[in-house]
Amino acid sequence: MRRHISTRRLVFWRCAGKCGFTMIEALVAVTILGFFVVGVCALVVTTRETMDTARAHYTASNIAKNRIERLHALVFDDLAQYAEAGVVVNDSGMPSSSGNFMRTTVVSNVNDRLFDIRCVVTMRNRVSLAFEGGGESVQTLIARYEAPER
């Protein structure tokens, strides 16, 4: 005579102590997930810092370029008086004591008909709040225009 064995008991009997996760397996899985999350967070922070630095260099370059363009529009004989050293400016190039950029404009007289103009903009370090590093530089020559004699 055959005995009928319930399938419920059989499944339970096969899985007894073997089904599911142990505490060690769960801890290992959580640890691996934690390392992954920390790595992703570090990547996001590094990417953000790199983007901020790139944006600051782009802004500094535009400030220097705009300063040079403004000097091109001035009267040649007045250029020497627009030299400046260490003027703190904001993102748009306007003087501001709380700005994140420092602009220096050097106007050198090459000869009586030619000026060499160099504008250097350095960025404020976000950690030390000091202006350091080479920054962005734009240099140009401006010549006196003399109409040809007829």
Image (cartoon, rainbow, N blue to C red):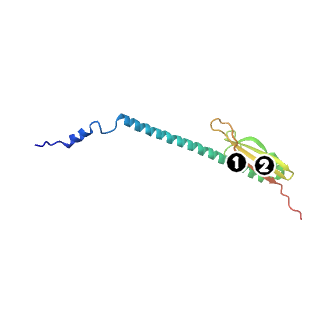
- In this view, the residue in front, 83 or 119, is 119
- In this view, the residue in front, 55 or 70, is 55
What residue sits 59% from the left and 44% below the top? Answer: 50
Q: Amino acid at mark 1?
A: Ile
What residue sits 82% from the left and 54% below the top? Answer: 143
Q: Residue tagged by mark 2?
A: 117
Q: Position of residue 1 (x, y in %)?
A: 10, 43
Q: Position of residue 133 (x, y in %)?
A: 69, 40
Quadrant (top left/top right/bottom left/bottom right) for the C terminus: bottom right
Mark 2 Cα shell of 10 Å, populated few (<14), some (14-19), many (≥20): many
Viewer-side label of 2, 1:
2
Q: Secondary structure at mark 1?
A: helix
Q: Residue tagged by mark 1?
A: 63
- Distance from disc 2 to disc 1, alpha carbons, whole Å, reads 14 Å
Q: Secondary structure at mark 2?
A: strand
Q: Position of residue 33 (x, y in %)?
A: 44, 40
Q: Which residue sits furthest front?
A: 1
Horizontally, is 45 left or right of 25 in the view?
A: right
What residue sits 76% from the left and 41% below the top? Answer: 85
Q: Position of residue 11 (x, y in %)?
A: 24, 41
Q: Amino acid at mark 2?
A: Ile
